[in-house]
């Protein structure tokens, strides 16, 4: 024990001598003290991460309960036949015709003032993709419905904003099909040799409604790498803009994988 001071002195001299290689050490700490501090920092970081995750999970669980209450109370109802038909017609627009026809089909939403839309081909990987952009004549931005779309506080207007997001998702993701009706199911073509099941046996009905200040949409989609999934989203508005567009629940109805590697 009487040589501890000598050992400590040697450790400090050694590490100070090699300071240029040890920028992470403080002059007044021994190596094990540095390690202890590192462990404390790591523990704090892990705890903060877990707290954030726990808060997120609680918020999402709360939203699920709100959605279930709204549906049970009759606020969330089956999407109208007119809006389902509108979706099918809108999704049949080719990406090259989108700019000229989007607001002919979707007449209850508008692009923000002084913005125009354009489409660019993004090359890379196995497939090229076409993305939608907006510009204010000074700067170009990738299209974001929350920033560049004016939406009325009505179910029809929110549904149409949702359809634009769906259209963007379809063209940004390979093998994605939105399923609102039996006709949509019949149009799905599997990439691989594996046959599709009778997806029409599942409840693919889209639902929409307003509960308090929140809009809820529940819909189905089919992924070539994932299968049939029901997703529930929350949308809120502020000053005719979308302030929240949040996926809070995803339920797998039928697992499927086309088996093709890309």
Image (spheres, rainbow, N blue to C red):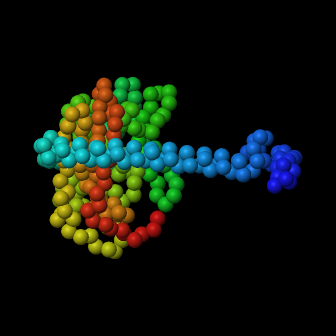
Location of residue 228 in the rendering, given as x and y in whole percent from the top left corner: 28, 61
Residue at the (35%, 28%) spot, across then down: 112
The residue lying furthest to the front in this view is: 2
Residue at the (24%, 51%) spot, across then down: 219
Q: In this view, does 24 lie to the left or right of 53?
A: right
Residue at the (51%, 52%) spot, across then down: 123
Residue 90 visible (yes or no): no
Where the N terminus falls, by quadrant?
A: bottom right
Exactly how many numbered labels are in the figure? Answer: 0
Location of residue 21 in the rendering, given as x and y in whole percent from the top left corner: 81, 49
Location of residue 179 in the rendering, given as x and y in whole percent from the top left corner: 24, 55
Q: Is residue 94 left or right of residue 202?
A: right
Nearer the observer, 261 or 46: 46
- Give above or below for 106 relative to 57: above
Nearer the observer, 240 or 2: 2
Location of residue 41 in the rendering, given as x and y in whole percent from the top left corner: 60, 45
Nearer the observer, 195 or 106: 195
């Amino acid at each position: 024990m009487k040589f501890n001071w000598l050992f400590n002195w040697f450790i400090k001299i050694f590490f100070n001598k090699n300071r240029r290689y040890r920028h992470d050490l403080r002059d007044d700490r021994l190596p094990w003290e540095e390690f202890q501090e590192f462990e404390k920092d790591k523990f704090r970081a892990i705890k903060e991460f877990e707290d954030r995750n726990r808060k997120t999970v609680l918020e999402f669980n709360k939203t699920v309960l709100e959605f279930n209450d709204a549906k049970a109370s009759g606020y969330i109802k089956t999407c109208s036949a007119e809006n389902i038909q509108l979706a099918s017609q809108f999704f049949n627009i080719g990406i090259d015709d989108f700019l000229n026809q989007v607001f002919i089909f979707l007449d209850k939403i508008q692009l923000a003032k002084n913005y125009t839309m354009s489409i660019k081909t993004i090359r890379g990987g196995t497939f090229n993709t076409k993305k939608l952009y907006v510009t204010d004549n000074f700067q170009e931005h990738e299209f974001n419905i929350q920033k560049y779309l004016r939406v009325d506080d009505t179910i029809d207007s929110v549904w149409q904003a949702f359809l634009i997001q769906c259209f963007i998702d379809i063209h940004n993701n390979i093998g994605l099909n939105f399923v609102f009706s039996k006709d949509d199911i019949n149009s799905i073509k599997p990439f691989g040799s594996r046959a599709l099941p009778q997806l029409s046996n599942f409840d693919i009905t889209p639902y929409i409604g307003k509960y308090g200040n929140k809009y809820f949409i529940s819909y189905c989609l089919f992924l070539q790498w994932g299968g049939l999934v029901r997703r529930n989203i929350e949308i809120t508005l502020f000053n005719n803009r979308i302030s929240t567009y949040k996926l809070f629940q995803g339920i797998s109805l039928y697992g499927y994988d086309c088996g093709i590697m890309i």
